[in-house]
Structure formats: structure tokens, C-alpha cells
Image (tube, rainbow, N blue to C red):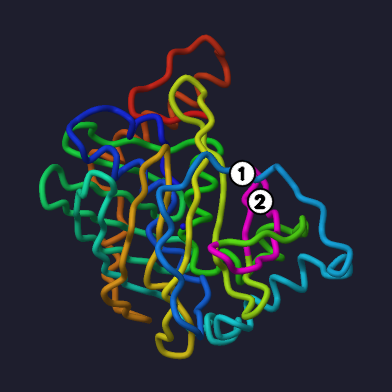
Amino acid sequence: MIPSTRRTNRTHGPWPILALLLAAAILAPAMAAETGAPAPAPPPPPAPAEPATAVAPAPAEAAITAEQILDQYIEAIGGKAAWDKIQSMVVKTTTEVKPEGLKAEGTAWYARPAKYHYLVVPKEGETEERGTDGTVFWHRSPSDGPLILTGEDRTQAILDVRLDKLLSWREIYGKGEYTGTEEILGVPCQKVVLQAPGSGRHLFYFQTGDHLLAKEVFVKMGMNQRRIVIEVFYRDYKKVGDVQIPHTVVTGVMEKYRVETVTSVELNAKIPADRFALPKDVKETAEKVAAQAGAAAKSPTAAPVPGSQPR
């Protein structure tokens, strides 16, 4: 489970690094679990291949399809029926950004179909928030103020916080593409490319033995249209209720990486409706961005509104 990387690259002390790393979503709740010992934490990711780079499948596996791989994954994490019973979730985490050693604690609230609020409190520095009411996706910090995601950034961010992101892959993505196998931390994995309408391509690596998700790779556009490759490793999966959820998520961005450890998960939590309401300053900025978008449609030369993040 994403916010823009351009705005979060601004230098208001060390914590924009954490904000950038949060671009990969703090938790993909519908990720699988692992029955064996957890894999070791990966080192800071080197410059990886981008999702669009496909490797030809081995002849022995030519008959496998993306559909089969995705369906096996859904069964491995508890099955769609078990996940359909979960209407909300509260996840608490501890986070460390390396190599700086920056630490924070966070809480994320999720509710179907696509409501989300995340609050991160660092040991030092500024508290940051992000969230969506299912329509507007926003990010806010004391230094930057509110930021509204637009275009592909908004589409992908809302998709990434859905509890059924991969469970409902047929409805969301339509189809997938199997692109071969590759080892991740010594474990053979099958690669599947998915692309939802209005978003970029994502490459998912599913372990061949237990069908669990090991890694996700996607590309964001940073400052000056720089392409930023983001890698997310999922491990230390544990059973919560009738489903499986990863309890360690390692995200690598631009030679830095974030290790996020889940400390608690509450399924079907009672979350007040106002938890997902837009804060006043966010709502005002969103209205300005929407008005500016309407003006831009009529006048392509109209200047962008501060706080918008077009793609």
C-alpha cells in the first residue's frame, strides 16, 4: 500500500526521507503469510530493474498463468471469503529509516471500500498525516501544509490502501501478465505484472513454494521528472484471526530503506466516521485544486494551485 515523491523531497529536516519512503504504503493488508522461518532483512536495495522489464519464463513453467498465481496467493492468505468478512482494520507500527537510524511510531486506520488515515509520530521532528475519504487523497505536515494528490498519483494511492487490492484483482486490474521467475533473498518467485486503469505498472513477486507475496516493485516520478524505483519486501507473516498479514515491511527508495514492524492489528475495529473526514485546511485546498483543474480544462495556460500534485 501512494503519495507524491516530489513534495516530500523538500528539506525540512530529516523526516522528509520518511515521508518519501512512505510512498510505498505502510501496509498492504491483503498480503500473505509465511509458514516457515522469516527471511532475513534485505540490505538497502541497489538500483533495481523497473517493472516494465520482463524476463522470459522458463520452459518448464510456460504453462503457468498470472491468473493461477494470483488465485493461489489468495488461498494462501486465508481465502477471499475470510477477507470479505473484514470491513475495517487498525494497524500500529514502529518504523526505522536506515542508514540514518530515524525512528517513529505510526497508526493506520482502514475501512472499506477505500478509506484510510495514517498518523506517524517520529522520535524527533514533525508529525505527519495522510489519508483519503475514498475520493480525495491528501498528505499534511506542519512544514509543508496540505498536499492533494491528483492524476495517476491519486489513483494509485487510493488503490494501494484498499483492503482488497489483490483479493479483487479481476475487478481492479482486469488481467495480469506472467513474466517469468526470479530469486528474491534466495527464494524462487514467480513474477506478475498488474496495471489498473489510470495507474502505472506494478511488478509482484510470489514465492513458488507457498504462493506468498515476497516483493513489489513500481516506479514514481520525482522532482524534475526523475524516475524513482520503489521496492517493497514483505516478510514475517503471521496469522491474525482467519487471515495472514505481513508483520515486517521493508521499503527501499533512492539508496535509503525503511523497516516497518507491525506491533498490533485489530480486525473489524470500531472506527469513528470522522476519522476519515477531510481536515478543514485539507478540504479547502482540495476545493481550490478542483476549481483550478476546472479552469485548466478551459485554459491550458492556467497556473497550478499550490498544494496540488499533478502528473
Using the image as rendered, state which of residue 275 and residue 102 is in the foreground.
102
Decide: marks 2, 1 in contact (CB < 8 A)? yes
Task: Residue 121: give x, y in percent of width and height.
Answer: 17, 54
Query: In the image, what residue occupies the spot 89% across and 69% down?
Result: 63
Q: Amino acid at mark 1?
A: Ser
Hey, which residue is sitting farthest left in the picture?
124
Separation of marks 2 and 1 at Cα, in angstroms: 6 Å
Which residue is outermost to the top?
Answer: 301
Q: Main secondary structure of the magenta part?
A: strand
Highlighted range, magenta = 185-205
Image height of 269 relative to 104, above or below: below
Residue 78: give x, y in percent of width and height.
56, 85
- The image shows residue 81, relative to residue 125, as above or below, that is below
Instruction: Describe residue 130's horizontal placement relative to residue 192 as left or right.
Output: left
Q: Is residue 138 above or below residue 287?
A: below
Residue at 72% of width from left, 71% of height from top? 69
Quarter of the view holding residue 139: top left
Magenta stretch: residue 197 in it?
Answer: yes
Q: Quadrant of residue 303?
A: top left
Query: Could you tell me which secondary element the residue under label 2 belongs to?
Result: loop
Mark carried by residue 199:
1
The correct choice, above or below, for 6 with respect to 81 in the image is above
129 vs 202, left or right, is: left
Residue 239 position within the rendered picture, expressed as x and y whole percent measured from the top left: 43, 86
